[in-house]
């Protein structure tokens, strides 16, 4: 059983999946001279089923944040200078691709930026920005050389996130510019990002920007009030049953509380409230997992994330980190199921139904990021 440690056999099997994803990411890192040097190319498009799988992928900003972080952590773990250089090159590309406004676009098909609101205007993404910040900030806290370009990038991202909080001071951070909805995972992504930016600027660059700390506190305080009695966090404040985004809200919460002490974030919900929320969330997630490790989608997922393998990985990650015997057993069932779905390529498929699709770089990078904690569990 997984109790913050795993058996040797289980470690080997998870490590094999992680190695396959790492090799895939190395294969698709783009070193063609030009504007995409250091990025990761995805042959498959964005995950929403309404988008065209056959339209081809792109150099996703969010995927670069996750992929570069994984390469940096693996490079450090194995003292592999080649991986460290590749990771730094990817972070350099990411910083250079940031919008002058401070965020990053969400890329859909063939480099086309998203336009969910169909305005034809520039539309930066809270989600892409958050994954970029997550990767860059954590790598800096784990020894990435503290270049001025990274300092500037994190400061700009923090100021952009605060600029889209609406109403100002509410703790509501839209999924993307001009979105009219209170989307809970966007709030917690923004909260984690602002907290990480605050900590990284303070500890690595000796720069203290308290408005980032305050913004993080507002984001989490606002979002926690929408947790249902059964532990679910809806996709939007009052709409949408979703185990996928419940896991994502919990992931952002865990990341934040593990990286900052309560003293760093005055106004943040206290540890008892946090523990109650994560325990309730875990109860809901366990109820969505069958004895065979399959996700029970019907009745538990109304978002476009339905059938995504990504959900298995992040749910196992948060249950394992929340801890406790029931959560550990459920996390192991999910991981065992993942192992049975591994394709001949060594990669996991993107979905647990339909045609086999594997070569989506940002999803593979995120899955690797979710699985890495299991390799350091011992």
Image (tube, rainbow, N blue to C red):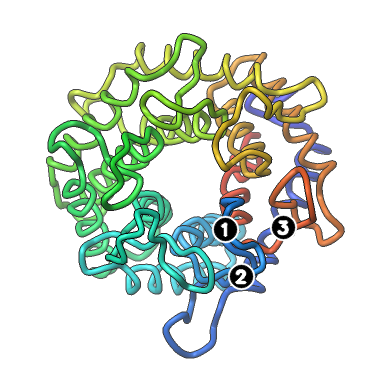
List x then y, in percent, for residue 253: 40, 30
Discs 2, 1 touching: Cβ within 8 Å: yes
Give whichever of 93, 48 is nearer the camera: 48
Question: Residue at coordinates 73% horizontally, 49% vertically from top-left?
Answer: 15
Question: Label 2: which residue?
Answer: 55
Give whichever of 277, 353 is nearer the camera: 353
Question: Label 1: which residue?
Answer: 51
Nearer-N-terminus badge (3/2): 3
Report the Cα–Cα distance between label 3 and label 2. 28 Å
Badge 3 density bin: few <14, some 14–19, many ≥20, Cα 10 Å: some
Report the Cα–Cα distance between label 2 and label 1. 8 Å
Question: Residue at coordinates 57% horizontally, 68% vertically from top-left?
Answer: 83
Badge 2 density bin: few <14, some 14–19, many ≥20, Cα 10 Å: some
Up-down relation of residue 286 to residue 86 (above or below) = above
List x then y, in percent, for residue 85: 50, 73
Up-down relation of residue 158 to residue 56 (above or below) = above
Residue 271 falls left or right of residue 72: left
């Amino acid at each position: 059983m997984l109790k913050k440690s795993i058996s040797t056999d289980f470690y080997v099997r998870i490590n094999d999946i992680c190695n396959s994803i790492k090799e895939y990411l190395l294969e698709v890192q783009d070193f063609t001279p030009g504007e995409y040097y250091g990025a990761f190319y995805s042959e498959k498009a964005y995950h929403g089923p309404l988008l065209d799988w056959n339209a081809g992928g792109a150099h996703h900003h969010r995927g670069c944040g996750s992929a570069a972080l994984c390469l940096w952590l693996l490079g450090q773990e194995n003292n592999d200078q080649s991986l460290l250089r590749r990771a730094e090159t990817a972070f350099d590309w990411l910083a250079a691709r940031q919008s002058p406004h401070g965020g990053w676009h969400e890329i859909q098909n063939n480099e086309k930026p998203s336009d969910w609101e169909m305005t034809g205007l520039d539309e930066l993404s809270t989600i892409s920005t958050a994954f970029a910040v997550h990767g860059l900030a954590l790598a800096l806290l784990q020894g990435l050389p503290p270049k001025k370009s990274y300092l500037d990038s994190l400061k700009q991202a923090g100021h952009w996130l605060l600029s889209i909080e609406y109403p100002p001071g509410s703790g509501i951070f839209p999924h993307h510019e001009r979105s009219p909805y209170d989307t809970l995972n966007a709030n917690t992504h923004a909260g984690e990002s602002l907290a990480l930016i605050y900590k990284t600027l303070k500890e690595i660059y000796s720069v203290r920007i308290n408005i980032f700390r305050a913004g993080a506190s507002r984001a989490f305080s606002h979002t926690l009030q929408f947790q249902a009695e059964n532990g679910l966090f809806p996709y939007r404040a009052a709409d949408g049953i979703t185990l996928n985004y419940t896991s994502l809200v919990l992931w952002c919460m865990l990341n934040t509380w593990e990286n900052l002490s309560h003293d760093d974030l005055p106004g943040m919900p206290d540890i008892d409230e946090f523990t109650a929320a994560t325990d309730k969330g875990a109860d809901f997630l366990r109820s969505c997992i069958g004895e065979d490790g399959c996700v029970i989608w019907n009745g538990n997922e109304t978002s476009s994330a339905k059938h995504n393998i990504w959900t298995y990985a992040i749910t196992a990650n948060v249950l394992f980190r929340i801890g406790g015997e029931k959560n550990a057993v459920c996390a192991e069932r999910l991981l065992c199921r993942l192992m049975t779905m591994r394709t001949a390529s060594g990669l996991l498929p993107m979905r647990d139904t339909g045609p086999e699709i594997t070569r989506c770089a940002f999803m593979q990078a995120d899955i690797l990021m979710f699985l890495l904690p299991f390799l350091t569990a011992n």
